[in-house]
Image (tube, grey):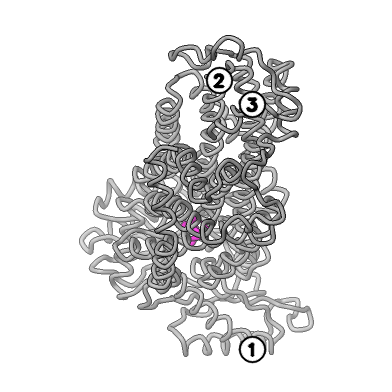
Amino acid sequence: MSADRDRLGVWLRRLRWPVLVAWVLLVLLLSHASSGLSQVLNNGPQAFLPASAASTRVVELEQGTSGAASDQATVVMVRRGGSVLGTGGLTAAASARAAVARLHVAGLTAPGPLIPSRDGKAAQFTVSVTSTTKTSAQRDTTAVKAVRGAVTGPAAAAGLQAEVTGTAATNADSGGTGNSTVLLLRAVLILAVILLLVYRSPVLFLLPLIGSLGAVTAAKAAAHGMANAGLTVSTLSSSILVVLVLGAASDYALLLIHRYRDELRQHARKEDAMAQALRKVMPTLLASAGTITAGMVCLLAAQSASLHGLGPIGAVGIVCALIAQVTLLPALLLVCGRWVFWPQVPRHGRPGREDSRVWSWVGSQTSRRPAWTAAISVVLLAAACAGLAVFYTNGDPVSSSVKTTTGSAIGEHLLIEHYPIGDIGPVTILAPPAQARAAALAASHSTDVASLSQGAPAAGYESATVILSVSPYSTAGTSAIQTLRQNLARAAPGALVGGGPAIQYDIATAAHRDTLLLIPLVLLVILIIIAVLLRAIVAPLVLVVTTALSFGASFGLASLAWRGLGFKGTEAQLPLYIFIFLVALGVDYNIFLSARIREESRRDGTREGTLRGLAVTGGVITAAGFVMAGTFLVLAVQPSVLVAEVGIAVVIGLLVDTLLVRTILVPASFVLIGERVWWPGRSAVGTPGQAGRAISPEGATGDRDRRATL
């Protein structure tokens, strides 16, 4: 062993306890900031809007007037049983009880007038939810809970059903502020079970889990600091950050422990084994983390504030995951020693099996008919892409954000049933006083405008509320918003159009722009990084094309799953979130597999190198895929439909990527293309006598197996 390696082993032995102490102190110092992340989340309209959008300006002006954030919560009361309501609608007693319920809310905030429905079977009034608290999630949860508590008693006494709907109620029903701890506990529990099954050791699984939790603490504290600095962090971003860091940190731990176990069989001193393991896995870990980080940084080009903020937050999270698992995890492993692997303790001088019997067999079958294998895989993925036919975006912030059993969803359904369709999404117009009359006249004559009423002034602007005669969040509603803005641009150039339908239109417009920009940008960045890593062009092109095909198939299957679960479409931005995570996380497996294939191909040629690379890394890739899928699975049971849809799609994508694309389609493609896959680099064929050597059923290829790097 060289002096350099001796020095690294010595330093690892000396620093194991200081590193542990440093991490304990760091976690203690950052725990307050980490736990406080939920207090600085922003789920308001500005979190998903471009800063330059007209609807963003309307929200800012309205908030400036009240000195606080403001949303509208609409209370709808309808009959519970026919005994209370006559055939003509609400009885006098029921109407009186509705008025009493409104008076109870008046003790909290100033409600609007009680407005009976045309059919006489319902009554509604609006409540302006305002607060000086910094976090909109906390504000909405607290305010909506108070409003619901105020109306429940009087409504129930009259046999009426009271529901609270609107933006604030939707935010409260989609998660509020109390889910961060529950989310983390669920993710840790699932992760612990998977790691226990992977390592088959009652102690070993705890060490990568500890490292992952340290990384989560550091990442959440960093996100808290960035939020205080002005970066937008939404509930969706916060939830994704937790599972992303847990999953990535666990994947990195799998690679390190896999190599460390092998090195323990070759070194008497555990410090020397760890030094060798770190040297061999660090290039792969750095390439993997660097690629995901670069993909996240691309999100800085997004117009959406939430997506823009997710970029640096996700990048910092990945860096925290890497640092924790190459510092804290090695220190824990060195302190514990070999016994932590019990009952399968790796002993010095006792060789172990490095490859997987299952993936050796899969590789053998794939290599016999690579063209057929690749063709069948592509056909299966293309068939899954057909699921995209049922995908559709839904601009309605209620039905696309919360499950149908929540109060806000039920309340919106009741509004649609008893009131004009336009009432579910009023449009706000703000105009300078000198242009207010012209703006009102132009708006009242616009297509699909049912009514216009004067509102309270806002920050020096005259306000008006427009009710559309069509569904505000439909294609017809989008056309109405466009026409309204065009008419106002001519008649009152200083007027601004906002409100729920305009917000959703601006979000969809920004999402379309971001999609056209970010998808090619992220794929290009990944292509360049993999090309530099493999020093080739053809192989990276194969990997990027299969990645894109995998995303299409996964998104198609996810669309079918969403439809089967009764989700009413999704928001326009969500496909981009899913694309970023599926592609960025899929790069991990690209790098794990292709780097090992490249290394093996230098000795045995591309065909045998591909089989050997799959046999050695297939088990690790499968375990890593299940770990990452398991952590994202916790998102699928969240109350927010948006968060649940991300979780479902990423889980499906990771399983497709792990079980089909990376372990079958990519190896079949490499074998089919042959040595040209490394073009324009030189042929990877090794020295004579090696290229034809087959992998034995037992995977015993002598010392070469132990020298190979991951």
Figure check: 228 above or below 323: below
* Spatial CA span between label 1 and label 3: 70 Å
Amino acid at dot 1: Gly
| 506 or 463: nearer the viewer | 506
| Circle 3: residue type | Arg
Which of label 1 and label 3 is nearer to you? Answer: 3
- The answer to whether residue 635 is left or right of residue 21 is right
Q: Which mark is residue 601?
A: 2
Mark 2 → mark 3, Cα distance in angstroms: 9 Å
Residue 33, position as x, y percentages in the image: 39, 70
Q: Which disc is residue 612 wearing?
A: 3
Amino acid carrying mark 2 in the image:
Ser
Secondary-structure class at tag 3: helix
Where are the magenta residues, as a range? 235-242
How many residues crowd around disc 2 within 10 Å: few (fewer than 14), some, or many (20 or more)?
Answer: many
Q: Quadrant of residue 427?
A: bottom left
Q: Position of residue 676 (x, y in %)?
A: 52, 12
650 versus 541 height, above or below: below
Q: Main secondary structure of the magenta part?
A: helix
Q: Work out whether residue 451 can be spotted.
A: no
* Residue 93 visible in the displayed image: yes
Name of the residue lying farthest toward the left: 434
Q: What residue would you read off at disc 1?
A: 153
